[in-house]
Amino acid sequence: MNILAVVTALAALVLSVWALVRAIRRLSASGRQVIAAGVVEVLILLTVIFAIVAQGSGHVTGDPLVLWGYLIVAIFVLPVAVIWAFVDRSPTSSIAMLVCGLTVAVMMLRVVQVAALV
């Protein structure tokens, strides 16, 4: 699960850098960024599945409330950015994608720290 969470964090960082470039160029979030956000969301869901398996088998030693808090919030952050990208076609949508991508990256790195697999 740790490797998947790190890969998810890296993918979210790539999405954030892409959104930063578009925001600097004063462009709105693109359809390709929405697809990339979907890919990151799938990675988050896979991390959740692996977390369920790891916790069920007793391999997670960290606080389960904190772990699940991060995972549940991470699930809902990127859909907010995607909805924002569909509703607002201004450069603000790129900034929203940037902030949400950074949020997911930090949360997934915290998942790695909290999970502390045995």
Image (tube, helix red, strand yellow):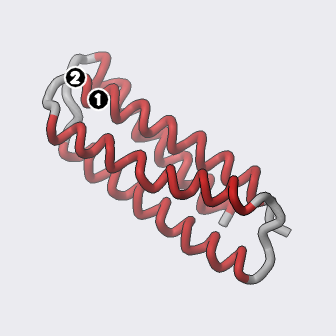
- Could you tell me which secondary element the residue under label 1 belongs to? helix
Q: Nearer the viewer, residue 53 or 25?
A: 53
Q: Residue at image x 75%, y 50%?
A: 113
Tally of numbered tags: 2
Label 2 belongs to which residue? 91
Q: Quadrant of residue 48?
A: bottom right
Q: Which mark is residue 107?
A: none
Q: Is residue 25 above or below residue 40?
A: above
Assign the C terminus to one quadrant of the image.
Answer: bottom right
- Mark 1: give few (<14), some (14-19) or many (20+) Cα within 10 Å: many
How far apart are labels 2 and 1 at the CA level? Answer: 5 Å
Q: Residue at image x 16%, y 41%?
A: 86
Residue placed farthest to the bottom in the image? 57
Assign the N terminus to one quadrant of the image.
Answer: bottom right
Residue 68 x %, y %: 62, 60
Label 1 is placed on what type of residue? Ser
Q: Residue at image x 50%, y 50%?
A: 73
Residue placed farthest to the front in the image? 65
Residue 91 x %, y %: 22, 22
Q: Nearer the viewer, residue 95 or 67?
A: 67
- Could you tell me which secondary element the residue under label 2 belongs to? loop
Q: Is residue 102 above or below residue 71?
A: above
Q: Are marks 2 and 1 in contact (CB under 8 Å)?
A: yes
- Mark 2: give few (<14), some (14-19) or many (20+) Cα within 10 Å: some
Residue 100 x %, y %: 42, 37
Label 1 belongs to which residue? 94
Q: Nearer the viewer, residue 58 or 101?
A: 58
Label 2 is placed on what type of residue? Pro
Residue 22 x %, y %: 28, 26
